Image (cartoon, rainbow, N blue to C red):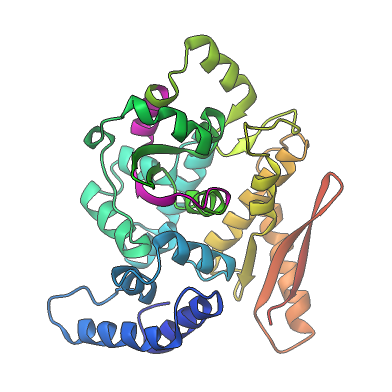
Amino acid sequence: MRGDSSQAYKTGELLVREGLIHQEDIGTALAIQEKRNASVTLNKTRFIGMILCDLNLITPVDNYTVLHKNNKLITLSSALVQKEIISLEKMQTIEAQSLREDLPLISLLLKTDVVTMQVMQQVLFDLFHIPFRSISDFIFDDDHQPLLLQIIDSRMAKENGIIPLVLKDNTVLFGITAPENLLLIHQLNQQFPQYRFKALFIPFSGFSWFHEIIYKISKQEKQNSDTHATRGREVFPDTAVTKGYEKQVDLSLLLGHKAAIFDPKDQWSTIQTFYNRYEMLRTMLGHPETGDRQSEFTSFIQQAHKKITSEGQNPDVEFSFQKQGRDVIILARPKE
């Protein structure tokens, strides 16, 4: 998905297959893309999915979910490295720090001044068609609290770094701290079809402040919450259930994650994301944390890729998860 017509057709066909657009919509989007390419002033790297969002044919949540499902996403890390905004080595250091401090990558990049606010806003919008806004731009209406709490409760919001900001008519605007939150919004949209969900990126500091306003959490409730949950993963016991929404949904999101590996040496970001999902799954299934095993995991992926590609001509290998009791195994097979 680099802006050329062949990649545009691949993305478009995936959206057609999902029933989100019609075949002729691809041609319309391509015509707009070609016009942009011919312009000397317009951004020439407008992805086909973003153009379809401009046309209101799909939503950013639709686009992200379909590309994620088919392993076609360009991550924020990869985009920043490809645009030479940050070096590969620096990005790897920042990503490790993000995991260590349990802080969203976007917020850490801004906090450490590695990426300016202006650049971050532009890159996020180019990739996901979602703006980055300050939380101070919003005023919470207390009358909407009961409805918003039915959609997403305090614990789920805290664990995932996502917050409902505004309810207007039947539309709920969510503040999200990471692109992966769009998968949860997709799940919520299926659970509450009476609402329409939109999203915008917010800084994690703003999320923490607004979370306490919306959920009116007392100090004691906050202490109890912090002993049982951390953002993004469940801590023992793994049988805990959030109100109206079982943790099994989070498991299904993680179990559905796949990684298409063509060249293990170049696809460090893809392997790291896959590893993070693996460790999250193990923790949620009741296994103790075992420390950083990134290098060991990467070696396993490289060996599995080498073994499978040596047996056939297709260098594309698809890695996926399978739950067996309380264990998680990794499956590898040539990509169809």
Q: Is residue 318 above or below residue 298?
A: below
Q: Is residue 80 left or right of residue 330?
A: left
Asked whether residue 74 appears in the rendered view, the answer is: no
Nearest to the observer: residue 308 or residue 250: 250
Q: In the picture, which quadrant includes the C terminus?
A: bottom right
Asked which quadrant contains residue 202, the reply is top left
Q: In the picture, which quadrant includes the N terminus?
A: bottom left
Residue 78, x across and y down, in percent = 43, 63
Q: Is residue 29 left or right of residue 102?
A: left
Asked which quadrant contains residue 280, the reply is top right
Residue 60, x across and y down, in percent = 40, 61
Nearest to the observer: residue 100 or residue 226: 226
Residue 290, x across and y down, in percent = 73, 38
Q: Is residue 290 above or below residue 118?
A: above
Q: Is residue 244 above or below residue 49?
A: above
Image: magenta residue range:
191-212
Q: Is residue 76 above or below residue 1?
A: above
Residue sitting at x 31%, y 47%: 114
Nearest to the observer: residue 155 or residue 107: 155
Q: Furthest residue to the top?
A: 220
Residue sitting at x 21%, y 73%: 43
Magenta run includes residue 331: no
Residue 194, x across and y down, in percent = 48, 50
Asked which quadrant contains residue 207, the reply is top left
Magenta run includes residue 192: yes
Asked whether residue 92 appears in the rendered view, the answer is: yes
Q: Count all numbered tags in the image, as a single digit.
A: 0
Nearest to the observer: residue 24 or residue 48: 24
Q: Furthest residue to the right?
A: 325
Residue sitting at x 68%, y 30%: 235
